[in-house]
């Protein structure tokens, strides 16, 4: 079955690479990521800052008891807590298996933070707030099955605790942290993740399109149904397609930038997911879904940095 779809994917890839780009996103539906320029790896003269936020939540994957968790927040250069007029787009970022809050800002000697500084300084994107969060609770098991239990419940933490805590403190486009105001500002909110964080990103799409418009799944597929080794790709895409139609997302707007490296150890699930998504062009048009690969990319943060460099200008244009 997937051999046939692989041929279809190849045909669609060739067609989209040769065709004109979509009107909204200005890129073909499939292709290769652009390398991060060397100058974006050099410290900016206008660096942003990173600070920790501790918030009250519940142990949603456990007994539901009250707990606290931490996340790390990147604030762009010039952010002023006293300036309530200036508003910022925001992206939430999720780590992979055995990862931790904040790792997007310290892995590879802070390369992603440096890149964000440069992209903002050079005008590639508007000044943006970025949140490096975790689906783990303090002391929770990091074994694989326990990790799956944790990320499956993360959307509850996001909706009820993390997002209200962050956007109640920092100046995003949400006028308040009421569900109504958070939903009204969905056009200014993105969610991305790597590896199990990519799986979490697909689950956020399944649960939280009322709050989020832009999605960046990096090296992973949807496990709303199934799990690792039992991916149930067709069933998952059926469900995503159903959500798009039932929630009128074509008109309300959504965009998924799906990415993986050609040398990624778990690339097969991303390729199968992309293959199935691209086989439904009436639903997943180039304005709503694109699939890009990093030539020679591995399952690491070098690849993540490149995916973010390519995706963020499509989310948060100047």
Image (tube, rainbow, N blue to C red):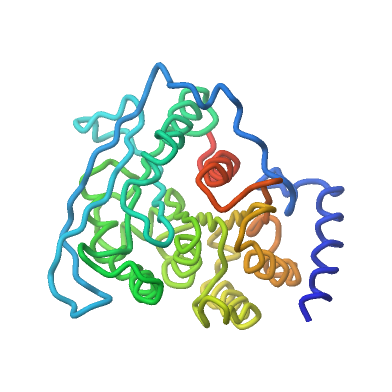
- Residue, x 65% and y 52% (percent of image)? 261
Q: Residue furthest left?
A: 66
- Residue 128 x/y as whole percent: 40, 38
- Residue 160 x/y as whole percent: 25, 66
- Residue, x 46% and y 23% (percent of image)? 121
In the displayed structure image, the side of residue 46 where residue 57 appears, left or right: left
Q: Nearer the viewer, residue 149 or 129?
A: 149
- Residue 56 x/y as whole percent: 15, 60
Residue 198 versus residue 188 in the image, above or below = below
Q: Nearer the viewer, residue 17 or 246?
A: 17
Residue 240 versus residue 183 in the image, above or below = below
In the displayed structure image, the side of residue 66 where residue 305 appears, left or right: right
Residue 272, by quadrant, is: bottom right
Count of labels in the image: 0
Q: Quadrant of the N terminus?
A: bottom right
Q: Nearer the viewer, residue 232 or 158?
A: 232
Residue 2, by quadrant, is: bottom right
Q: Residue furthest top?
A: 45
- Residue, x 39% and y 77% (percent of image)? 145
- Residue, x 65% and y 35% (percent of image)? 35
In the displayed structure image, the side of residue 170 where residue 282 appears, left or right: right
- Residue 32 x/y as whole percent: 72, 46
């Amino acid at each position: 079955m997937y051999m046939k779809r692989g041929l279809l994917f190849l045909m669609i890839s060739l067609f989209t690479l040769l065709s004109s780009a979509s009107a909204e996103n200005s890129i073909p539906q499939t292709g290769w990521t652009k390398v991060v320029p060397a100058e974006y790896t050099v410290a900016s003269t206008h660096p942003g800052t990173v600070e920790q936020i501790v918030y009250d939540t519940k142990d949603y994957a456990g007994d539901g008891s009250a707990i606290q968790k931490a996340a790390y927040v990147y604030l762009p250069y010039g952010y002023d807590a006293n300036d309530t007029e200036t508003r910022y787009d925001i992206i939430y970022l999720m780590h992979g298996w055995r990862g931790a809050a904040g790792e997007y800002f310290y892995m590879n000697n802070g390369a992603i933070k440096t890149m964000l500084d440069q992209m903002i300084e050079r005008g590639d994107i508007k000044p943006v707030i970025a949140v490096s969060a975790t689906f783990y609770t303090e002391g929770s098991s990091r074994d694989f099955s326990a990790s799956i239990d944790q990320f499956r419940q993360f959307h509850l933490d996001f909706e009820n605790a993390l997002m209200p805590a962050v956007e109640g403190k920092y100046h995003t486009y949400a006028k308040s942290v009421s569900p109504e105001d958070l939903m009204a500002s969905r056009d200014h909110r993105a969610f991305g993740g790597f590896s199990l964080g990519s799986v979490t990103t697909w689950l956020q799409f399944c649960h939280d399109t009322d709050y989020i418009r832009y999605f960046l799944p990096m090296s992973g597929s949807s496990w709303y149904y199934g799990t690792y080794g039992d991916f149930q790709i067709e069933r998952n895409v059926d469900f995503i397609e159903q959500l798009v139609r039932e929630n009128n997302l074509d008109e309300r707007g959504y965009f998924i930038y799906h990415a993986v490296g050609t040398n990624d150890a778990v690339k097969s699930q991303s390729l199968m997911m992309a293959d199935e998504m691209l086989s439904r062009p009436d639903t997943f048009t180039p304005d709503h879904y694109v699939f890009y690969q990093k030539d020679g990319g591995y399952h690491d943060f070098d690849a993540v940095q490149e995916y973010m460099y390519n995706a963020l200008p499509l989310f948060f244009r100047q």
